[in-house]
Amino acid sequence: MVGLIALLALCAVPHIVRASGDDCAPRDGMYVHAALMLSKGYEPYVHFTQVAFPLAEAVLAAVITVAGPTLPAVEWTTNAVILLTALALFVAVRRSLGLRPAVIAALLWSWGLWVVHFNLFERETWAALGTSLALLAYAPLVAARADADPGPDDDDEARARPGPVPLDWPRAARIALALGLAFTIKITAVMPAAGLCLHRALVGDLRGALRLGLLYSGLIGAATLSASTVWGRPFLEQVYMFGFFRQQTHDVLGAWGEVVAHLDHTLLLGFVGLVTWAPRRGRGLAGAAALVLLMDLLYATVISPTLWDHNLLNLFPACAVLGAGLVDALLRPGRGRLRLAALGVAGLLVLAVVFGSRPYMAGEYGPRGPGFGGRAREGLERRAELIAMHTGPDEIVECIMPWWAFVADRVKFVRYWDLAPVALGVEASLRADGWSATFAKRHDALLLGPGLPPPPKKTQNLQAYAARLMACSLTYIRPELLDALQRRELGLILEPLPPGVLTERDLWAAGYQPFEQWGLRAWKPQAGSRPAVRELHQR
């Protein structure tokens, strides 16, 4: 127990350092703002756009209710999830590979560059807990000898290949529950489930694969049916339909280039382990982790239209297992061929990074890079303090960044700029044009809505998703925003203003006046008038 506590403390070191630093990574602020709205009694899919099940937001809402909407409250909740994931990986690998690789797996996960960098909230980090718990429940199925290193070199690997341990219904239910947890946090977590089902089938346990598949399908079907019963068609449209209208960021080759350009030590070791260490141990945990990783890579590089740096967090649990097994094998005596193979694969990956078409670790991470960089906490909190200072607790505000409103404990009017316009357009198009016409518009810049009107001129030089976002913002968001301004329903608008959608002329015309404080510029109703408070309004 003392050793386990020491390991978890070691896993927590980079996150303690991160939490005590000046920078943070305030990405995906719409989800923490959604948690704030849940804590205030708003409904997902009705009062704000929500493109996933609201489980993670509900947990954060409970934390916010107790600790308040602060950066530390969110950050330490995420850190708790990270440490629980490290613990699950440790126990899973300990059962199959031994103590040393278990320690390495926990450290590779918790010390991963992207796990450390995205310190506030990312759905992928939370979903990784479900994947790791599934590997933990799966580990007893794989015989220890299937992952063993009996011989002095790789030619002597796994001479005895025991038959598979059948997957019975109780264990299949535990695995399915863990995978279902991941799914209700991020629906793309269906890929690890596919990997584990495939592994069961490949080791000869077809009945086990069928049991796991049936239970998992039943769980996600029940979750979907329950949510659609509560929230109706908006839930189905936002969770399952919206993904078809996301931005196409890369082709397949470009997506692989993006993966290579963002390799950290955990991903590098995981990929090397996938190629050099896992193939001869396919019947054990190594094979299961390899198939989970391959399924996640298939989604990231082929199926998904988008790939951002934080999406790579999906790969980390499996890479931690594979990397730990590789490092443990390399530390054993007489592994000459494995060392040469690992060195060769690692060298090829390094060459791909050096001579690739994409800059290594490209992105806006702040002055200290992607590990401990980000945006200044002080700047974020200063903007939140300004919002809170000039508005009442029930007033609606507007700002580009949801984190500013969250820390100020205020509700934003537009929820959210990179989601709501397209979600509203999809809804309008489905109702007016039907399914086939709506899907026909998913790859172009046409305005999503009744008929097929051409996009506005100002969108002609934009990429398809950006053009669609602008067109839908002008059609669905701008009229409602102007109406709210005329009714004085917004207590404050913090610059920068949303480009192309709201202008200073609009604010002057609605009776708002600018003011400056702490080097920031904001707008509020002219003296003598207070904004009306709308208790609940559509997103």
Image (cartoon, grey):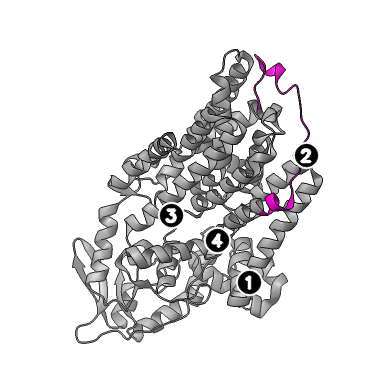
Question: Magenta: predominant secondary structure element?
Answer: loop
Q: Which of 250/453 is in front? A: 250
Which quarter of the picture shows residue 319? Answer: top right
Separation of marks 1 and 4 at Cα, in angstroms: 31 Å
Q: Are marks 4 and 2 in contact (CB under 8 Å)?
A: no
Amino acid type at mark 4: Tyr
Q: Which residue is mark 1?
A: 226
The answer to whether residue 231 is above or below residue 286 is below
Label located before the other in sequence (3 or 2): 3
Residue in the picture at 63% in, 65% down: 240
- In x, y percent, where is residue 293? 62, 41
Instruction: Give yes or no for residue 154 being in the magenta stretch.
Output: yes
Q: Split into 4 quadrants, where in the image is the N terminus? A: top left
Label located before the other in sequence (2 or 1): 2
Amino acid type at mark 3: Phe
Q: Which residues are magenta?
A: 148-173
Q: Which residue is mark 4?
A: 465
Of labels 1 and 3, the one closer to you = 1
The crowding category of the residue bearing disc 4, from other C-alpha atoms within 10 Å (few below 14, some 14 to 19, many at least 20), is many
- The residue lying furthest to the front in this view is 1
Q: Which mark is residue 202?
A: 2
The crowding category of the residue bearing disc 2, from other C-alpha atoms within 10 Å (few below 14, some 14 to 19, many at least 20), is some
- In x, y percent, where is residue 8? 42, 39
